[in-house]
Image (cartoon, grey):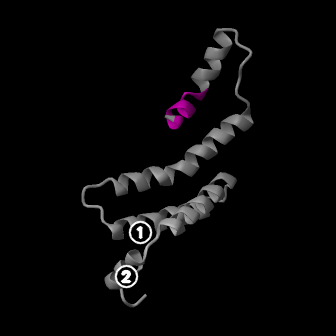
Amino acid sequence: MIERFHKLKVCIDKAFIDIGSDTTFSDLEWSTIKDLIESLQPFKLAVEALCRRDSTLLTAETTLKFLLEKLVTQDKMLSAELSETLRVRIKERRTVVTGILIYLQNPKI
């Protein structure tokens, strides 16, 4: 939804002018919206991967690793905060079974 909103940037600005509204979005606000879209894009991909019928615990582990790597490489404040929060939440939820499954899949690690 945010992506669609951002794509309609010009139309939204023109609509505000047409109705005579004092409300406008600054360049900083549009930039923040774009950063939000970029930060949430890896989450969109991760959710799509995790919602597949053939998704397993190993798939989830790989998907979360991919998600964290993408967030770190974005070099944005929001991405860093999301990454750190996600790491804390994963650490809270991680069990011994996950480590065993990863080891059984690839014992060389």
Q: Amino acid at mark 1?
A: Glu
Real-space Cα separation, disc 1 to disc 2, in angstroms: 12 Å
Question: Where does the image place residue 23, in percent across and percent down from the top left?
Answer: 71, 19
Q: Position of residue 61 (x, y in %)?
A: 41, 69
In percent of the image, x 37 and y 82: which residue is there?
A: 100
Residue 54: x, y in percent? 25, 61
On whether residue 39 falls in the magenta region, the answer is no
SS for tag 1? helix
Circles 1 and 2 in contact, beta carbons < 8 Å: no
Mark 1 or mark 2, which has the lower sequence index? 1
Mark identifier at residue 100: 2
In the rendered structure, the answer to whether residue 57 lies left or right of residue 36 reads left
**Magenta segment: does it hold 4?**
yes
Label 1 Cα neighbours within 10 Å, binned few <14 / some 14-19 / many ≥20: some
Q: Quadrant of the C terminus?
A: bottom left
Q: Residue furthest top?
A: 19
Residue tagged 1: 61
Q: Is label 2 in a helix, a strand or a loop?
A: helix
x, y percentage for residue 3? 52, 37
* For residue 99, above or below residue 41: below
Q: Nearer the viewer, residue 36 or 92?
A: 92
Answer with the quarter of the image where residue 98 lies: bottom left
Q: Would residue 70 be found to the left or right of residue 57 on screen? A: right
Seen at 60% across and 59% down, the residue is: 85
Please state the extent of the stretch shown in magenta in the rendering. 2-9
Residue drawn at 40 percent across, 52 percent down: 47
Q: Please give left or right for residue 65 compared with residue 85 in the image.
A: left
Relative height, residue 36 to residue 52 (above, below):
above
Q: Residue at x 49, y 34 (%)?
A: 1
Secondary structure mainly formed by the magenta segment = helix
Amino acid, disc 2 = Ile
